[in-house]
Amino acid sequence: MLGSLRRAQYSIVLVTGLMFSAAIVPAAQAQTASTLRQAQGSGQAYPARPIRMIVPFPPGGSNDIVARVIGQQLTERLGKPVVIDNRGGAGGMIGTETAIHAQPDGYTLLIISVAYAYNPWIYKLNYDPVKAVAPVAQLGTGPNSLVVHPGVPANSVKELIALAKARPGQLNYATAGIGSFQHMSSEMFRIMAGINIVHIPFKGGGPAMIAVIAGQSQISIGSLLQTLPHIRSGKMKALGTGGARRSPALPEVPTIAEAGVPGYEANNWWGIIAPAGISPAVVKKLNTEIAAILATPETQKWFLGEGGEVVSRTPDGFGKWILSEMEKWGKVVKQAGIKAE
């Protein structure tokens, strides 16, 4: 099942200073049984119709890959289609706002990544990133990877840093856009390595990968889940990974920290949230079904094979994780001076 999906894939792949209260799963969720029946469709068991899962980035990024893998299995478990709806643009803001402003009936879900933790620091939001959402489930996590076009005359992190210092402002790095995981982890690398490389933002992870493969950009630092197929095919050269330890998917590739930038660590993660006001019963059902999917050896093997790992949390636990990421990456935004265009 996952194997066929994998073959069919495209070569795919903060709150601000706001305090998260215990209401990370909003109090508005406390609906009565009659409200729940209405949200589920005139008393029918949930789900009674297809579920839309919004991916706030174009096809080709890690969010899209994970959404399709989990969505396919969720379709099988729930007995209703989970339809992937890519709504890219503005660093994920367009798709996020579409989902948050949808009816909180369980039929619109949003897949998020670490980018959700950045955006409140970068953009002026039209919603409250705490009160407007209800965490449903975390799915997994995975390190970034530092890759270069095969023609770049550097075969290690140290050699790349030396090259960048010899050619200040001449090398560029491609990202999925301002505020993307690629942008943030690249800025962290730039700051910690003390180099001058130029940011080239694209509208999604897919276009950014194409730019590096074509040699239009020299460097990319993004999810290993996204770059791994290109590394294996020889279209990209891996110099390091951003986890605390080497990735089982690329055991021969050192971590960026051990290869020349001590203390560097950047991991992406993926999860599902819903508009605030969704019934706790629907959240519980979704979390239970997703946890069952994540517990299967097949799903765990898929994540490991793609350079990531399964992470299953309760809705409350996922909310607390989001908070910790917001605090961590907010510091990077401020230090790098990242702002929306």
Image (cartoon, rainbow, N blue to C red):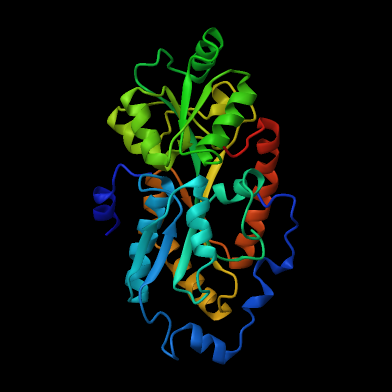
Can residue 270 be seen here? no
Residue 3 % position (x, y):
27, 53
Quarter holding the C terminus is top right
Quarter holding the N terminus is bottom left
- Image point 50% across, 35% down: which residue? 246
- Nearer the observer, 22 or 234: 22
- Image point 50% across, 63% down: which residue? 99
- Image point 35% across, 65% down: which residue? 83
Q: Is residue 325 left or right of residue 36?
A: right
Q: In the displayed structure, would residue 267 be above or below residue 22?
A: above
- Image point 73% across, 67% down: which residue? 22
Q: Is residue 4 left or right of residue 125?
A: left
Residue 262 % position (x, y):
63, 25
Residue 19 % position (x, y):
75, 57
Q: Is residue 4 left or right of residue 121?
A: left
Looking at the rendering, which quadrant does residue 26 occupy?
bottom right
Residue 340 % position (x, y):
59, 39
Residue closest to the far top: 166
